[in-house]
Image (tube, helix red, strand yellow):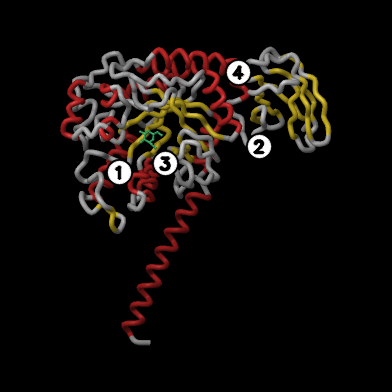
Amino acid sequence: MGKAIFIRLNALSILLLLIFSTVSAQTDVADQPSAVQVKARQHFMDMKFGLFIHWGVYSILGDGEWIMHSRKIPYTNYKRLADFFNPQDFNAKEWVALAKNTGMKYITITSRHHDGFSMYPSKVSAYNIVDGTPYKKDPLMELAKECEREGIELRFYYSLLDWGRDDYAFGSEILDGKPVKGDWESYIRFMKTQLTELITNYPSVKGIWFDGEWDRKTADWHLDEIYALIHRLNPAIMIGNNHHLAPKPGEDFQLFEKDLPGNNSAGFSAEAKIGKIPLETCETMNGSWGFNINDRKYKSVKELVHYLVNAAGKDANFLLNIGPMPNGKIQPEFTDTLAKIGEWMKLNGESIYGTRGNVIAPQPWGVVTAKGNVWYTHVMKMPADRKVTIPVGNKKLKHAELLDGNVKVSFKQHKGTVILFLEKAVPDSLDNVVKLKFSL
Ligand code: FHN
């Protein structure tokens, strides 16, 4: 074998080895989470219900967070919004109390959305709430402190997509994994610095929620480096990415937008094959993420409770969104509905928190959540004859009762099913929860 060929073959085998070791290292990260990650993921699944907050300078225009893009506002003009973003009525105590009273266990808030405005003092972007607005204060720090005091987890949404930065060069063609215009390496470096700021300056943060990867499907986002950086800074931080695909190595939870896992009603989830990590679905209270003054398509308490219950039935957390107003207040239509959901959670939280789903397939009457040998049968659509048939296999039912009021429910067990007789249930209740205790 000639010397040149030998050197080429050797170089090729080193390259193959490098590729192989990277792939297997990534697989390891995905398949073998550390003990810290396992604990964080279990805790996340136990929490079940969180508050999503989309807030930024766009709230001033009252037409959602995409307004710069949809109204084709030039970036230089849009940036002026920061000059009058002054949310004097923002009160972290009120926001955290709202989440807590609704029965939510965590908050995920936009630290930076697609418009590139940072909701915290970033050393690498003066276009931020402290350095670029008359407000000059850091709401994320106030939230972090209040969340810690109240035992609510804090997580940050972070947009990968940026409409304004020159190095991102929005709209540029992608060739060989990079935009032809702009400076991709500089943009990746910028994001790494911001993420480092977010994780080190707010040490209680427990999750990073990425969004916008879909803007550049063929770009090399350096996610392996970004994810490794986050987990190196804090191994307990959970990483999720709203890329609408199957989970990628290094991700700790899978996100679904406006859809229950397995559905594709909103059109985002066609390629979102369900993975083996915890699941979360997010939804709006009307039709908008950011504050929209003209959106009156409010979902009812019943719709939202059913969303939460159906998500739990499919083993997914529910992240329910609000878009606060530019003064920092939350509109009464939202707070009223959330208060009613909170009342329902006070009575029925036992059937949601700490449960696991996918116990049986969804049934025409509703879904089941479970904690070990206790099942919670959520009857959201009462059959006319008030009889509910549940496939239970060879499990032996010992006792059944309505969770609301501990009223005993009579039942019959027959050929792998249990039939519940629900004469005492309230047929038009949001959800008749029947607690079933099986023998061990
Ligand atoms: O473009 C964003 C949108 O503004 C919002 O943040 C939602 C939340 O899931 N995600 C993106 C659309 O997929």
As rendered, which of 343 and 285 lies closer to the eye? Answer: 285
- Mark 1 or 3, closer to the camera: 3
Query: Taking 62 as reference, is 361 above or below it?
Result: below
Q: Quadrant of the C terminus?
A: top right
- Mark 4 or 1, closer to the camera: 4
Element type where label 3 sits in the image = strand
- Give the amino acid at mark 2: Ala
Asked whether, in this view, residue 197 is left or right of residue 331, the answer is left
> How far across and down, in percent of the image, does residue 232 sit?
39, 44
Q: Which residue is mark 4?
A: 430
Q: Which residue is mark 1?
A: 192
> How far across and down, in percent of the image, does residue 317 sit?
52, 31
Is tag 4's residue or tag 1's residue first in the polypeptide sequence?
A: 1
Q: Residues within 10 Å of mark 2 (few under 14, many from 20)?
A: few
Q: Which residue is mark 3?
A: 241
> How far across and down, in percent of the image, does residue 38 sit?
53, 40
Label 1 close to label 3 by CB (< 8 Å): no
Is tag 2's residue or tag 3's residue first in the polypeptide sequence?
A: 3
Element type where label 2 sits in the image = loop
- Give the amino acid at mark 3: Asn
Element type where label 1 sits in the image = helix
